[in-house]
Amino acid sequence: MVLLRTMSPAPNASLFAVKRTRALFAAALFLVASCSLLNRGRDEVTCEALEGGRINSCEGSVIASCSDGVTVTYKVCDTKLLPGDDVCEASWQTPGAYRCADAEPVPLLNACGNGTKADFEGCDDGNLTDGDGCDTNCTETACGNGVKTDGEACDDGNVVDDDGCDSNCTETACGNGVKAGTELCDDGNVADDDGCDANCTKTGCGNGIKTGTEACDDGNVVDGDGCDSNCIPTGCGNGIKAGTELCDDGNIIEGDACDPNCKLPACGNGYKAMGEACDDGNIIENDGCDSNCTKTACGNGIKAGTEVCDDGNLAEGDACDPNCKLPACGNGYKAAAEACDAGTKNAILGECSLTCVVNNVLKVADGYDHTCALITGGKVRCWG
């Protein structure tokens, strides 16, 4: 149906204006039939192309709106239709309605905000106010209707998550309360140690957030990388056997099953434990600390260096003299039964005899090649 209304011309309207109005009436009938509008001599505009199911446009004194996508209705105005007048001036349209210049508002047919709910509208409260229950796109005020209202940070017209504006109308981000993308949790805040940390991973060792009793957290549970899988810095005594550690019992106490250097208790492990005189980390003899973790010396039980024997003591009269040589006259150690023992100097003037008896020198004579001495018992000893 074509709705056509011709208003009475103003007193000062000319006969030209009346004739023009009638011509426009005839043009309107033609335009309705073809459901299109000649837009000031430019391309045709069809109802299918009208955004929101309507368009307001002027051709002379004709204002057209598309009511249902098929039918175009017109209101022809003859007010102020004088040469040079323009009915499409700024005063012709008001929210939810349109009018010709100086004419009363005429409701737009099937337009959002006219108070009449059309089939394509979810609501229509007669205004174009947002946040009042029925928004300016004639959908009920709600997140996801495409209209950002109070309390919403965004509204992209859907309730799809991880598309920039999530289903709670907050921008996609960790801490907005919507678990999206690579997030493992999202509790609506960026507080740590509350079950879901500020990086939207569950509170726990290895999530990259140092919380609670954690001394470190490098975002993994790899050992030996500086922060071990128990979130304690890599080190002996942290309870994680890593690197060159042979054991790690979580402490640096000695005398238990793992020494404070994280090696198994043993001589040669480099840790001087109780009972050890030394521990140089090896079991090599004669290097200052022998393989029984005693300092290299005669009597430590380790035959080393120039020692001929070492029975682990410095007692005489046993199988090894206190100088770690076998018991004998001339070994340099004066045993109980010996009067003297000068070792290799025995039998030299002023020293012991070869039998470890003290020499009594009676007379000394120097020769060309030798020096000789007359000793007790009529014996002569020469040297040189």
Image (spheres, rainbow, N blue to C red):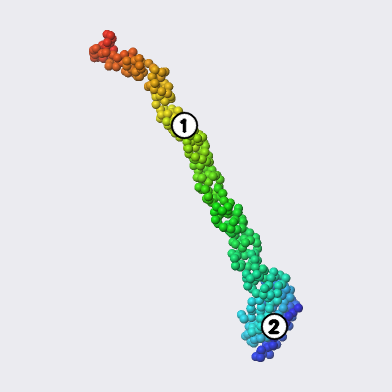
Residue type indicated by callout 1: Gly
Q: Could you say where residue 250 lies in the image, as x and y percent from the top left?
A: 51, 40
Coordinates of residue 6 in the picture (x, y in percent): 71, 85
The answer to whether residue 44 of the structure is visible from this angle is no
Residue 222, placed above or below residue 258: below
- Is 39 on the left or on the right of 228, as rendered? right
Residue displayed at 61% across by 63% down: 169
Examine the image and state in which quarter residue 19 appears: bottom right
Which of the image's four quarters has the N terminus?
bottom right
Can residue 108 be seen here? The reply is: yes
Q: Position of residue 376 (x, y in %)?
A: 27, 10
Q: Secondary structure at mark 1?
A: loop
In this rendering, the answer to whether 148 lies above or below 40 is above
At 39% from the left and 21% from the top, the residue drawn is: 315
The circle drawn on residue 83 is: none
Q: Residues within 10 Å of mark 2 (few under 14, many from 20)?
A: many
Determine the CA span between mark 2 and mark 1.
Answer: 111 Å
Q: Quadrant of residue 10?
A: bottom right
Residue at mark 2: 76
**Residue at the spot x=71%, y=70% of the render?**
120
At label 2, which amino acid type do we have? Val
Q: Residue at x 44, y 31 (%)?
A: 276
Drawn side of residue 38 relative to residue 203, left or right: right
Say whether disc 2 or disc 1 marks the residue closer to the N-terminus. 2
Residue to which mark 1 is pinned = 268
- Compare residues 320 and 337 and report the one nearer the observer: 337
